[in-house]
Image (cartoon, grey):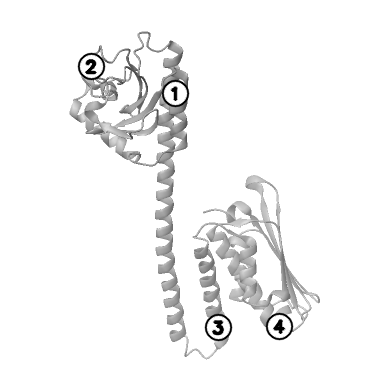
Amino acid sequence: MRGLVDPQLYDRARLAALSEYEILDTPPEADFDDIVQLAAQLCDTPISLVSLLETDRQWFKARVGLEQDETPIDQSVCRLGLGSSEMLIIPDLTADPRTARNSLVDVADGVRFYAGAPLIAPKGEVLGMLCVIDREPRPQGLTAAQQGMLATLARQVIAQLELRRAMLRRMEEDIERRQLNELLSERLNQTLAMINGLASQTLRAVPSRGPVESFQSRLNALTEAHELLQRKKWTETDMRTVVANSLARHATPERFTATGPAVQLAPKGAISTAMLLHELGSNAVKYGALSVPGGSIAVEWNLSGEGDDALLSLGWAEAGGPPAVTPTQRSFGAKLIAMGLGGGGAVRESYGPEGYRGWFEAPLVHLQRE
């Protein structure tokens, strides 16, 4: 392997690959500890190590039978295997000129046998070795079955490193996403506040206060919907929370009911649903059930179908208020209501003696789309 490329270039690539795993000097982890325990048992050795090699030291991510968590690189037998993808086996370390003078070997109770399977990263760099060590020489080395199992466990070490790196990246992405969401939310809140302030100043001289108040009420509803999503870190929020928050702007809890299954809405779906409920609530306060003391609102939602064909239906029913009258003019609020859930789907409205009724239906996938 190493003979095909410049040794210095290979070492730089190898060290860079090792660095990307962010594994050095981390605390023990059970997944790696289990591998060395199993390797020692399968090969019947007192010592087993997951050895990762830097320029001047070898560091043990997991170890059994050895107290040190690292040694200087000149004491490393594992470094002899860095240039090959083959297993390194030295039956008698005292008889091999490469290791006979090693300070871990050339002592009375030193190590005598070594077998190491290279830890090969996906792009081919050898990061270190999964090794088993004995204090007695083994002229026979390891059996073919033991060599096969040691190589398999070495691949499992790399698999654990890859999994760990993927989890670290996911955590970093989540942190970056939260930071970005917080910044965007802050900027958005500032923008909405500025728009509200400008609208108040600009529209102060408008003699007809109804449209002005409706505009500011919608803006406040939009701001509250964004604040709800901000508390949810701009991830999904549940339908029940959207309904309860929207109705609470217009009525006390005893004047409305909200029933339905658990449904998660993406930010866009949550905002459009909140704006629809705001228009319905505003109309109820002005003309419907909430315009009199005894009136009430019942909101119910249901799911039908499965998968991409699933539909969310939302029902709005007023009771105890004045008879509902079909409007003669199509106001802006009526147009917003006609857009339904998420700006699409079926809409049916009923005006009668019992009060206003509305049914709204939309594909669930449309409301859950990021």
Q: Residue 228, how many percent across, how many down?
A: 54, 66
Is tag 4's residue or tag 3's residue first in the polypeptide sequence? 3
Mark 2 in CB contact with mark 3 (< 8 angstroms): no
Q: Which residue is mark 3?
A: 213
Label 3 element class: helix
In the image, what residue type sits under mark 1?
A: Ala
Residue 252 location, quadrant: bottom right
SS category of the residue bearing label 2: loop
Amino acid on which disc 2 is placed: Ala
Total marks in image: 4
**Residue at (55, 89) in percent of width and height:** 208
| Residue at 40% across, 25% down | 154
- Percent from the top left, x then y, of residue 210? 58, 85
First-in-chain label (1 vs 4): 1
Specify which label sits upstream in the sequence, 4 or 2: 2
Task: Identify the residue at image location x=23%, y=30%.
Answer: 73
Alpha-carbon span between mark 1 and mark 3: 74 Å
Q: CA distance from mark 1 to mark 4?
A: 77 Å
User: Dot 1 corresponds to which residue?
Assistant: 39
Which residue lies under the disc numbered 2? Answer: 100
Mark 1 / mark 3, whichever is N-terminal: 1
